[in-house]
Amino acid sequence: QPIFLKDYQEPHHWVRDVHLTFLLAPTATRVRSRITFVPNPQNPGDLELNGEDLRLLSVAVNGNDVPYEVTDTGLTIPAHALGEGDITFEAEVEIAPQENTALEGLYMSNGMYCTQCEAEGFRKITYYPDRPDVMGVFTVRIESDLPVLLSNGNPTQKGAGWAEWHDPWPKPAYLFALVAGDLVNHADTFTTKSGKAVDLNIWVRPGDEDKCAFGMEALKKSMTWDEDVYGREYDLDIFNIVAVDDFNMGAMENKGLNIFNSSCVLASPETSTDANFERIEGIIAHEYFHNWTGNRITCRDWFQLCLKEGLTVYRDQMFSGDMRSHPVKRIEEVLALRARQFREDNGPLAHPVRPESFVEINNFYTATVYEKGAEVIGMLRRVVGDEAYYKALDLYFDRHDGEAATIEDWLKVFEDTTGRDLAQFKQWYSQSGTPRLSVEETWDDGALTLFFSQETPATPSQTEKKPQVIPITVGLIGPNGDEVVPTTVLEMTEAEQSFTFENLGARPVASILRDFSAPVILNRHIDAPTRAFLLAHDTDPFQKWEMGRMLARDTLVAMIVDGTPPAATYLDAIRDVVVDDDLDPAFRALVLGLPSEDDIAQKLVDEGHTPDPQAIHDNRNELRRIRTDHLADILPALFDSMKTGAFVPDAEGSGKRSLRLAVLSMLTLIDGGAAARAAFAAADNMTEQAGSLRSLLLADMGQDALVAFEKQWKHDRLVMDKWFGMQVAYASPEKTAQIAQTLTQHPDFTMKNPNRFRAVFGALAGNHAGFHHESGAGYALLAKHLIELDKLNPQTAARMASAFETWRRYDPTRQDKMRAELARIGATKGLSRDMTEMVTRMLGDD
Ligand code: ARG
Ligand code: ZN
């Protein structure tokens, strides 16, 4: 029962306004609706409303009884019963938020009512055309004894036990939100450029109010940034954020009432790491930026999801770069893109940035739609230039404000501002798979020619691939280490294409794909000394880092494939970077990072080998030891010199701490754990506490620290998620599944909280050698718990099933085991639509 992009049709009716009244009760909430529908002359027909898990109590049209048909998925009133002109539809339904463990629609979390409607959750609240092209003006009345009652838009009236809200901006139902609870607020105000005063609140459970200040600052910075950079102001009198403990995703951009997973908004130095702070700042910005890219301009249908998500991710990435460091941010983005999106694109779940069909849309909130979607926007900007980019965006906001738009609309504003034909560029939205870009070079009498060829491997349901438009940024470094040609954008459009740089004195070294200008895999055969030369001299920080990474990757592959020991070229090059005090500590820490075991597995596959997870793990550890020996003399002093004073979660402090902790994990291999134990005992912030615990766990010396950590933090859910996760993530391969299994027996483990489930099972799936241990225990344990979770929360269960997406990479024994677990999940009675689709896609034609 997939639905297809090509089948899009306008609805039979549009909505003008919506009045909702909620009488809140945990197991019997009443929802009364009064909706004005306007017939669509373009597509006349029955009144079709979605609705699921609703107990229908009454229906009326224009005050009268009408014939209607109710199914498991909706309610239809035949056209002949609707009369002429506008329709006033009224209904009352009953729902049970307390029993809603799927966390979609209206549900309860720790005694508070909250909602999650994107993508298709509103239909679990009342009968409604639950599709993003239908937009209405919402007025909401909430009746409850709980002290804080919130919905979208501006507050209008309230009294004892009730409150009313009105949102003047027409919106699709997926942006509806309601919150009711015993909450306290961290309040502030913001005045927009045009002088409008806005009340800002972060609402939390009592006890968490001291964890809101950082999020509030991030919100104000986001508001200023969107005014300065995109000319976009906020458009209501109030902006509310609510922290919720049980939440399937990171956060949600409901109009004027953003709802956040508490892990993505609550922060304090004692309980949050630098990475948490950075992520919180980025997510607050992301949801805020959706107010324009998503809410004011929304999506015509869910196939266009990347229209709002790719653009909003791109915007939050630029914001974070401006707030912190662009080079460091870019390297982190590429690491995440390769780890999640390339992995997806190279397996059975590969799909285009704009999918052409789906069974369950929740399965398409993916790295491809979000992160590759953002990369496509970065390429578009690179191709048209900065000035044209902002001109096109102005036109986009101007032309489509208040509309539900498409990717065609988006590309058209670029075509209209630049006069370019973007037909070929548009393939980035329709063609799945990661292009392989190969390059060869020749040197001829002062001219350097780069020959590029591109090829995209076949992906499920797409065997023929066409050449993409690939912006390739290139710079040239002369033999003495000076840059002789600064960054130039080469625009590749053919399968094979060459570019020549002339009038060069001596033969330079090319730096290719600077700033990672396209989401491709670059195949380039250069020797280790040339890579080391670029690591030392490239002026582009991304490529400088990339050369260190390629050296490490090639070193590891050679160790694994034919036992070649690491060369001095690599070890010395790393040492030179690590001791270079002119370089940003954050950058040096990134250079010290080794490719993940999953990355190495994929690289081995690309080179025609079958990856052995245990061998990858052992060799990577061996390389850690060899590097540690090579750097041993400088580690203690470097560790001390990176100590920070009072904790400030900014780029500078976090950079120093990341280098300090990277050094600590090496020191722990040679000092018997002394430094890590001392750092753990002395830590006054979570970054140092968790970082030193990690070092101890990786060296299998973490038992005492784990006990102390639990004792200190057992009352803090978010910190305990770290405790659950770290012991699995850093466990040795043969123990990983057993530790995860034991943790499921811990009194604080629960399947009902997605953060806790992800802490254990996300860590299991992410521990490459542990998950893929030859016993198969990791596979079996995950499958068993996914089957259980699917009954409670299909969305989170289906997302986590992608742990199995790489099953075809491995040897026949592991393949059989993984395929058997997938088949076992697939054969489960009553399996959700979400999980069924995931399993079917992963098994493919097998
Ligand atoms: N729009 C939200 C965001 O990007 C994500 C909501 C996802 N919800 C879902 N059910 N898949 O921040
Ligand atoms: Zn988003």
Image: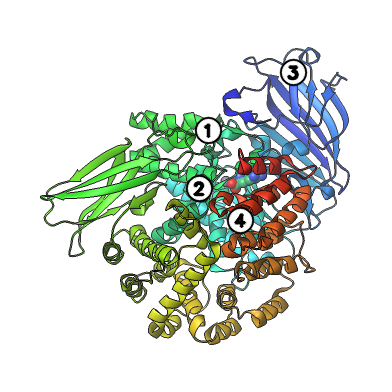
Please name the residue shown 46% across and 56% down the image: 604
Q: Is residue 395 above or below residue 476?
A: above
The residue pinned by badge 1 equals: 401
Q: Quadrant of the C terminus?
A: top right
Q: For the residue carrying disc 4, how many other residues have a C-alpha within 10 Å: few (<14), some (14-19), or many (20+)?
A: many
Q: Residue at x 48, y 34 (%)?
A: 463
Q: Residues within 10 Å of mark 2 (few under 14, many from 20)?
A: many
Tag 1: residue type? Asp
Q: Earlier in the sequence, mark 4 or mark 2?
A: 2
- Mark 4 or mark 3, which is nearer the start of the sequence? 3
Q: Circle 4 is placed at which residue position?
A: 814
Dot 1 alpha-carbon crowd within 10 angstroms: few under 14, some 14 to 19, many 20 or more: some
Hey, what amino acid is under mark 2?
A: Glu
Residue that numbered label 3 is attached to = 46
Which amino acid is tagged 3?
Answer: Asp
- Residue 432: % across, % down: 49, 39
What type is the residue that disc 4 sits on? Arg
| Residue 425 spot, x, y in % from top left | 39, 34
Q: How many marks?
A: 4
Front label number (2 vs 3): 2
- Regarding mark 4 in the picture, which secondary structure is present there? helix
Q: Which residue is mark 2?
A: 371
